[in-house]
Image (cartoon, rainbow, N blue to C red):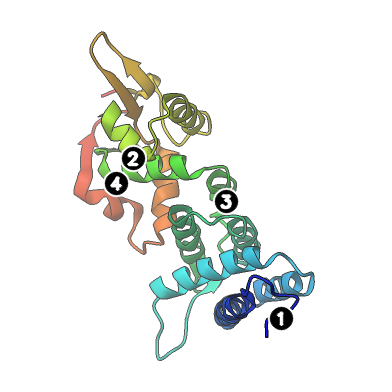
């Protein structure tokens, strides 16, 4: 006999989902407790405050992504996360379901972990990543993975001028809405993750009589954000070394 409160017969499915989500949250709790106890306390408050399940699930998925990329010694994690950064990353990632951005939050969490757990330098990247939509994240990821990178004598790195065709940018953005893409390019320039022609780069659409291209030249800030969001333990220069090009001056 059917449950009068479950006329669609979906109660068993819902219960299975709740058990699965609950298991993920429990695993995330154990991991977080080993990395950053203050953040674990905050996580507990969120549970007690009955925050929407999907937010907790998003945080848990991000933490599990981070855990899967971190190195454990004899089953133990030797690194700790700064509570200020860990809580900010958790809060921001709780609203994010897009896999690309979830991966970036996980990478930022990883790169925030140090031996003493005191490094708060990644705070500068939290608001930047939080401001990106999924299209902008894919554009930044593609630009940082494919642009030639210049390194100057003072150690500064910048992306070399990088243009892609209209067909390429629509494939990267996963939309052919030219106005939406243009808005995203302008926003990436506005917040400093792409750079403009004043430094030899070009951002936004560049039109000629026959072609339409998009400038997606990554800035130093954009390269740094993406590097941190991968969770790489390499140095910044070593991370980009395969595409590195030496320059004598910033105008050269």
Crowding around mark 4 (Cα neighbors within 10 Å: few <14, some 14 to 19, many 20+) is some
Asked whether disc 2 touches disc 3, contact meaning CB atoms under 8 Å apart, the reply is: no
Q: How far apart, in angstroms, are the residues tagged by discs 2 and 3?
A: 23 Å
- Determine whether the residue tagged by mark 1 lies in a helix, strand or loop: loop
In this orientation, does residue 247 appear?
yes
Residue 91 pos. (x, y %): 65, 59
Q: Earlier in the sequence, mark 4 or mark 2?
A: 4
Residue 35 is left or right of residue 158, and the answer is: right
- Determine whether the residue tagged by mark 3 lies in a helix, strand or loop: helix
Please give the residue where the numbered disc 1 appears in the rendered image.
3
Asked whether disc 1 touches disc 4, contact meaning CB atoms under 8 Å apart, the reply is: no
Q: Is residue 250 above or below residue 120?
A: above
Q: How far apart, in angstroms, are the residues tagged by discs 1 and 4?
A: 54 Å
Please identify the quadrant where the C terminus is shown: top left
Please give the residue where the numbered disc 2 appears in the rendered image.
172
Residue 19 is left or right of residue 98, and the answer is: right
**Residue situated furthest front in the rendering:** 1
Q: How far apart, in angstroms, are the residues tagged by discs 4 and 2?
A: 12 Å
Asked whether disc 4 touches disc 2, contact meaning CB atoms under 8 Å apart, the reply is: no
Mark in front: 4 vs 2: 2
Please give the residue where the numbered disc 4 appears in the rendered image.
145
Mark in front: 3 vs 1: 1
Please give the residue where the numbered disc 3 appears in the rendered image.
126
User: At x 21% / y 44%, what residue is drawn?
Assistant: 243
């Amino acid at each position: 006999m059917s449950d009068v409160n479950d006329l669609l017969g979906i109660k068993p499915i819902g219960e299975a989902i709740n058990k699965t989500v609950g298991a993920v949250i429990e695993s995330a709790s154990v991991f977080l407790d080993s990395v950053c106890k203050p953040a674990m306390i905050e996580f507990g408050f969120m549970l007690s405050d009955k925050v929407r399940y999907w937010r907790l699930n998003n945080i848990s998925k991000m933490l599990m992504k981070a855990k899967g990329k971190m190195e454990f010694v004899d089953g133990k994690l030797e690194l700790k996360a700064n509570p200020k950064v860990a809580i900010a990353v958790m809060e921001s990632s709780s609203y994010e379901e897009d896999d690309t951005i979830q991966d970036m939050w996980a990478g930022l969490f990883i790169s925030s972990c140090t031996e003493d757990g005191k490094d708060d330098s990644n705070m500068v990247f939290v608001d930047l990543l939080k401001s990106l939509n999924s299209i902008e994240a894919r554009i930044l990821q593609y630009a940082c993975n494919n642009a030639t990178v210049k390194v100057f004598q003072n150690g500064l790195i910048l992306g070399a001028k990088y243009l892609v065709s209209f067909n390429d940018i629509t494939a990267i953005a996963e939309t052919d809405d030219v106005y939406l893409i243009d808005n995203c390019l302008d926003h990436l320039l506005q917040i400093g993750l792409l750079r403009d022609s004043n430094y030899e780069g070009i951002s936004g659409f560049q039109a000629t009589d026959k072609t339409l291209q998009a400038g997606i030249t990554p800035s130093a800030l954009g390269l740094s954000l993406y590097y941190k969001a991968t969770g790489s333990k390499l140095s910044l220069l070593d991370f980009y070394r395969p595409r590195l090009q030496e320059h004598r001056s910033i105008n050269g």
